[in-house]
Image (cartoon, rainbow, N blue to C red):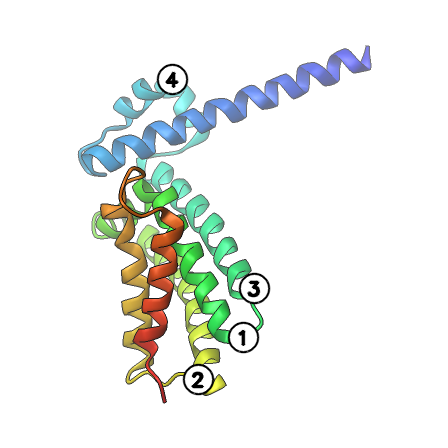
Amino acid sequence: MSRTDGSADNAGTTGSSSTEQRLMEAAGALFASKGYTAVGIREIAREAGLTIGSLYHYAASKEDLFLTLMRRNYARTTARARQAAMTGTTPAERLINLVKAHVLAEVRDSQVWRLNRSELEVISPEARAELVALRDEFEQIWRDVIEDVIADGSFKPEDPALTRFSIIQMCNGVALWYRPDGRLTLDEISGIISRQALALLGRP
């Protein structure tokens, strides 16, 4: 009897998770294709195959959906960045690994990253502050790695902060033009950009 009850509970949990995933995918696709302000909560529910009442079981509002998408995206990307920043025997190697990890993350989650950069001005100040804090946490990883590279003595950028912004923006841009059937593979592209990142850091 207990085994039957446990199976039912597991099935319910899986179904709930599947519904929530479908909702997040629908919201992300609509936000990316139409823009945050142009999408209504009913349209999201319809795209996900849910009633409005069912949608509100998972999110209190459209902004809540957007924040959930961004929180999850930052959680994944920041964890990967932190892992990459700890991989390598020298600061330069760790920077190379960080660049490659971020390029892959940008392409993998390009829809949500585009939203993050284009919609910050239309969400509430409280939501904006939360996303800025998540962004700052992510950028702190870059700041720490670049400071280690400089302290190592192998590189000496003219302006460390500007160099950091330039490297991150170079990584961010890949998702705008990358095509899986293009001339270069994503690994080749991330390798080239990582070498360009080191070049931006300059030599002492």
Residue drawn where x is 36% and y is 67% of the image: 195
Identify the amino acid type marked 2: Ser
102 to 139, vertically: above or below? above
Give the label on residue 13, or none.
Answer: none
Residue at the disc numbered 1: 90
Secondary structure beneath label 2: loop
Q: Nearer the viewer, residue 50 or 79?
A: 79
Q: Are marks 2 and 4 in contact (CB under 8 Å)?
A: no
Secondary structure beneath label 4: loop
Q: Residues within 10 Å of mark 1 (few under 14, many from 20)?
A: few
Spot the residue most to the front.
183
Label 1 and label 4: CA atoms lie apart by 51 Å
Label 3 and label 1: CA atoms lie apart by 9 Å
Provide residue 50's location: percent of width, then percent of height.
38, 17
Residue at the disc numbered 2: 154
Secondary structure beneath label 1: loop
Residue drawn where x is 26% and y is 30% of the image: 30
Give the label on residue 50, or none.
Answer: 4
Provide residue 199's location: percent of width, then percent of height.
32, 74
Residue at the disc numbered 3: 87
Label 2 and label 4: CA atoms lie apart by 56 Å
Q: Residues within 10 Å of mark 4 (few under 14, many from 20)?
A: some
Provide residue 34's location: percent of width, then percent of height.
19, 33
Label 2 and label 3: CA atoms lie apart by 18 Å
Identify the amino acid type marked 4: Leu
Identify the amino acid type marked 3: Thr
Provide residue 4's location: percent of width, then percent of height.
76, 11
1 to 9, vertically: above or below? above
Q: Is residue 101 left or right of residue 4?
A: left
**How many numbered circles are shown?**
4
Nearer the camera: disc 2 or disc 4: 2
